[in-house]
Amino acid sequence: MKLIIEHIRKNYDGRTVLKDCSYVFSAAGVFVLMGPNGCGKSTLLRICALIEQSDGGELIFSDDGHPLSQDLALRRRMTLVLPHIGVFNATVFDNVAYGLRLRGIRRPELDRKVAEALAFVGMEHKRKQNALTLSSGETQRMGLARAFAIGPEVLFLDEPTASVDEENTAIIESIVLAMRKAGHTMVIMTTHDRDQAELLADKLLIMKSGEVHEA
Ligand SMILES: Nc1ncnc2c1ncn2[C@@H]1O[C@H](COP(=O)(O)OP(=O)(O)O)[C@@H](O)[C@H]1O
Ligand SMILES: [Mg+2]
């Protein structure tokens, strides 16, 4: 899948956050967006993930040059993981299974996909634990497992290692590197950590004055 954004604008309460964002997310790989607090990174991610509408400009998703209509089917091919994911008062298994159940996937395929996703983030042994009792690093890894389980073609990660300790940060970075190596997923992420950006990025993007530029 390819995503072209053209002249994306967004205002909140008359204040311009995104002035003119244009970029071509051309293929699988890791795009890392950096920029100061409040510059609009999360806003742009929500707009690209079709969770929020822009005030102007265009988003064009396409497959082999064919534009895709922005409907539920397209939304289901992508997912956004927030810095503090939503956790249900249920087992890790059920939390990871959530997106699959929404998509109508049932046992035994459900079990297989959840097991695969938990293995991918190194948390198979936690499947029966109540998700509310996980550490914050484990909680973020569970969020990645939930995202990974649905096999997204575009994965948006908003500061995936904010409030995560060093050990879990390293694990999360290795998960993103594994996705990059597998080469099936376009990852569009934000971070404040320059070393992390350099480690993970195929393309490093900087947001400044409401615009996005390659570093
Ligand atoms: N729903 C909203 N209503 C009003 N202001 C918002 C809303 N969402 C974001 N903002 C404001 O837009 C600016 C950019 O926010 P954000 O995209 O979260 O920045 P970043 O992720 O780069 O830190 C901030 O000033 C923030 O307060
Ligand atoms: Mg943000």
Image (cartoon, rainbow, N blue to C red):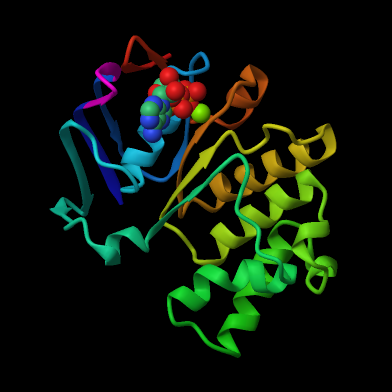
Q: Which of the 4 quarters of the picture holds residue 27?
A: top left
State the quadrant of the C terminus.
top left
Task: Give the percent coordinates (x, y) of residue 158.
Answer: 53, 37
Q: Which residues are magenta?
A: 9-17
Vertical side of 125 occupied by 43: above or below: above
Task: Give the percent coordinates (x, y) of residue 67.
Answer: 14, 53
Report whether residue 204 is seen. no
Task: Give the percent coordinates (x, y) of residue 184.
Answer: 46, 55
Query: In this view of the protein, which residue sits in the foreground, 182 or 104?
Result: 104
Query: In this view of the protein, which residue sits in the foreground, 177 or 98?
Result: 98
Please tell me whether residue 177 belongs to the stretch shown in magenta. no
Q: Which of the 4 quarters of the picture holds residue 152?
A: bottom left
Residue that appears at 68% across and 39% down: 173
Residue that appears at 77% across and 59% down: 132
Please tell me whether residue 13 belongs to the stretch shown in magenta. yes
Q: Which of the 4 quarters of the picture holds residue 118?
A: bottom right
Query: In this view of the protein, which residue sits in the foreground, 169 or 27?
Result: 169
